[in-house]
Amino acid sequence: RIATAGSVDDGKSTLIGRLLYDSKAIYDDVLDSAEQHGRRQSAEYFNLALLTDGLKAEREQGITIDVAYRYFSTPRRKFILADTPGHVQYTRNMVTGASTADVALIIVDARHGVVEQSRRHAVIGALLGIRHVVVCINKMDLVGYRQDTFDGIEKEYREFLSQLNVTPQFVIPASAKLGDNIAKVSSNLSWYIGPTVLDSLAKFSSKSLGVEEPLRFPIQDVYKFDARRILAGRITAGSLKVGDQVVFSPSNKTAVVQTVEAFNIESPPTQAHAGQSVGITLDEQIFVERGEIVSHEGSIPLVSKSFRANLFWLGQRPLEMKKSYLVRLGTREVECQVLAIHRIVDANDLSLASQDTKTSVQRNEVADITIQA
């Protein structure tokens, strides 16, 4: 799963279009529609961005608004690409696309270098825990394929990412429009020795399902079948099996797993692991409800009414202290308040913003806060 990132007009949609086009992963009707739209616009060349920008407003205005997911494969592996918006107004949509990604593909326009959105999207990726990063310096054809231009941008961006404890595995010069170093090696960039964008993406492994991690099983609902009470949900980490002694947090009740239940399976399973949606029955009829977290006795989660968090605020209105909000953990949702705003970080240069007033967090600001439920 790959999410693009970067500023407006850096060429994210064009780059994805090029990947799809060169890997022959485009349906004929989509290709025909894009070509017809290009002819109506009197385009001098086939606009690859039209292969991902499907909304009418996106095609008319030439910007990405919503997240577009595109699927393609090579003989080595399958990919899910999320084409995310670059405009600051649609940062919320970018977060949506990046929230499930294994890899961040950050695109930088060689003409403009590292700009505010290039930095902001890197901060978002770091907050979301994305550690596999590929940086593509796009539109190298518009700067004469100059190596010194590439080297300067690479140095600046690496220094910024290092402050986020992120090291890009590859920094690649390319031209998505002309296909240089996207899926094929370019003779125009003979001074670059390294993989193409497509080759670099094939080198990463996807996220682990978390089977080896401590058990975390949020209860989604409790169902009554005959005399059985089945606790159903999706295991987010770890595994469980019949006979396990489990603890329910935050109630701290304990029980033994009597059976593991699953739909559309002839013989009931005896165990389940992360990523599976299952039900369990217990050896005794204790009262538990939606929102409880199931874990093993030796690795129960920390239970607290307050916690400290790094937060990227997306609300139209500022986040304010002492105001009531909802916080969700798994399937549990409770009211909360912001107890303290310790610092606000400028996503552009990672410096601390003015700390004179710490009573609110503005839209698209990163803050270090304490929340009390």
Image: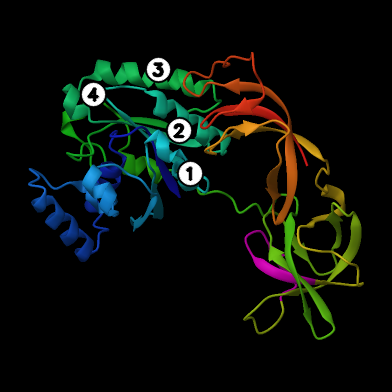
Q: Is the residue 317 above or below the residue 158 in the image?
A: below
According to the picture, the residue beneath numbered tag 2 turns out to be 121
Residue 183 seen anywhere in this rendered image of the structure? no
Q: Are marks 2 and 1 in contact (CB under 8 Å)?
A: yes
- Indicate the quadrant where residue 286 lies: bottom right
Q: Nearer the viewer, residue 258 or 112?
A: 112
Nearest to N terminus: mark 2 or mark 3: 2
Q: Which residues are magenta?
A: 269-280
| Element class at badge 1 | helix
Label whose residue precedes the other's in the sequence (4 or 1): 1
Residue highlighted by disc 1: 98
Residue named by callout 3: 156
Residue 263's image quarter? bottom right
- Which one is in front in this view, the residue at disc 3 or the one at disc 1? 1
Q: Nearer the viewer, residue 194 or 270?
A: 270
Give neighbour class at mark 4: few <14, some 14-19, many 20+ (Cα, 10 Å). Answer: few
